[in-house]
Amino acid sequence: MNPQLRAGTAVPAAAAVVAVVLACWFNVTTAGLRFQVVCCWLAVAVFASSMSYFAFRASRQMDPSNQQRRFWSALAIAAAVFGAGEWAQVVTAIVSPLSLPALTGTGPARTTALALGCLGLTAVVLSYPIPHRSARERICYLLDLATVVIAAGTYGVYWSVTSASDQQTIMADDLATVIAGPVVAIMTAFTIGRLYLSNVAPFNWHIGVIGPFAAVVEAIARALGPNLVAAGRPGVIFTMTVASHALLMTAAWGQYRSGSAGKQRHGTSRKRSFSMLPYGALWLTFALLVVSLVVRGSGPCTWTAVAGLAAITGVVVARQLISFVSNEELLVERDALAARLHTMAFTDNLTGLANRAQFLDRLDDALGDLDTPVGVLLIDLDDFKPVNDTHGHAAGDAVLVQSAERLRGCVGPADVVARLGGDEFAVLIARCGADDLAAVADRVVRALDQPCPLADGAEARVRASVGGAVSLDASRDALALLHTADQAMYEAKCAGKGAFRLAAVA
């Protein structure tokens, strides 16, 4: 085998061998229990200190300005705090190897170190910048975290109550052990796992997958510790604790050996609009309540489960309310976007008039009323091209905008004025006879004959050739109506421009 490859795999291989050998020893026999306790915590202390070393080395490989280096520096400090607590636990194991703190790993120094290290690391993870996360998404994230904390706390307190000699009272140090042990460990596991799934995590899968798993194993070992000792199975506690720390050290080593920060995983998973975690915590606590009612009746344990279930329900309801608000805002945004798209699809961008599509749609609707005559005017601006050639296209646009405003002033609010394209306009007038259409056409010709002031102080003058047609009851064909109006407009243009001609579709 390549010497470099052997050196690269020596650390995890050694950790695996130590963990497996110790696990076999711990679970095969309880002979030499005092020596087992010391060996367990000595191995755990070495693993925790090595984790701190590898995390520190990984941070040194990153640029000082990199946010990822901040995470790895925090992890190195947290692991150093863990290590200090583990070495204190070694002293406890040497002095009093058969005491409950030595057997379960719940010594004051170790518990305090675990709590401080996990809280510090969790604070860094929660403050790690994640792009495109809104304030409401951050609140939902914290509520999800609250469900994990409450569920873990409920289970921890439940086991503490069941293992207490007097179930009517539970000591404050028991509660502190639960909060500082399983709760903070699972909370840290959750925050690291969620950061890994965000696709912008500052670590590779070694920490994102192995880290949370190892933290949960450690939390379970601490929570079940008193019950396992009472059952004469301390070896299970030792095995889980050694294995979890061996995994954590291997994860930190894996990041160090990779020689790079966490790589963003684009396209590997689809972002879901909801999280199943709050509901999972709710159902797990509900299951605890059911089991407690069946096994223990309405005692302190059951009321512990009830309190946890009520608290988680409140958090889940709060999260649902936030989701409802978010959904309502999304619906409003959707409706606004739909309205905007509709406007863009049926409105002329320059003048704000209806475009050809909307005009034809409204014309079809008007012709659908068989008892109402419909009048149409087609308008073509004469001498518009010289305006563009002389004053520029910006001046031409200004003329079109002013012409649109004048056309609006010539008709009623229920009539439709449209720009069909270029310098061509159209007017749709429902309930319009030939005399009414002639009056509107005359107003249009006179309004568009007025000069248009330009931004440079000059004036542009255009005229309009207008052709109109009225659809009588016998014919409701839109194409025929428009064709007749177009022919009338052509006649007006040939007659000298600045005039109108009308026709009827019989």
Image (spheres, rainbow, N blue to C red):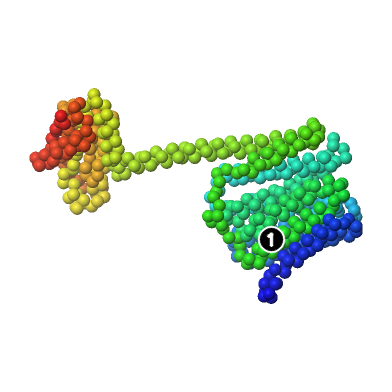
Looking at the image, is 135 positioned above or below residue 14?
above
* Residue in the foreground of this view, choosing between 91 and 236: 236
Along the line of sight, the residue nearer the viewer: 217 or 94: 217
What's the residue type where badge 1 is placed?
Ala
Residue visible at 42% across and 41% down in the picture: 337
* Left or right, 299 with reference to 475: right
In this figure, which residue is indicated by the disc labeled 1? 251
The x and y percentages for residue 419 are 25, 41
Q: Which quadrant is the N terminus positioned in?
A: bottom right
Of the 4 image quadrants, the one containing the C terminus is top left
Please state the horizontal and vertical placement of residue 258, each as a whole percent of the image. Answer: 63, 66
State the residue at coordinates (19%, 39%).
379
Horizontal side, residue 456 vs residue 232: left or right: left
Q: Quadrant of residue 371?
A: top left
- Report the residue that reaches farthest toward the front: 28
Q: Residues within 10 Å of mark 1 (few under 14, many from 20)?
A: many
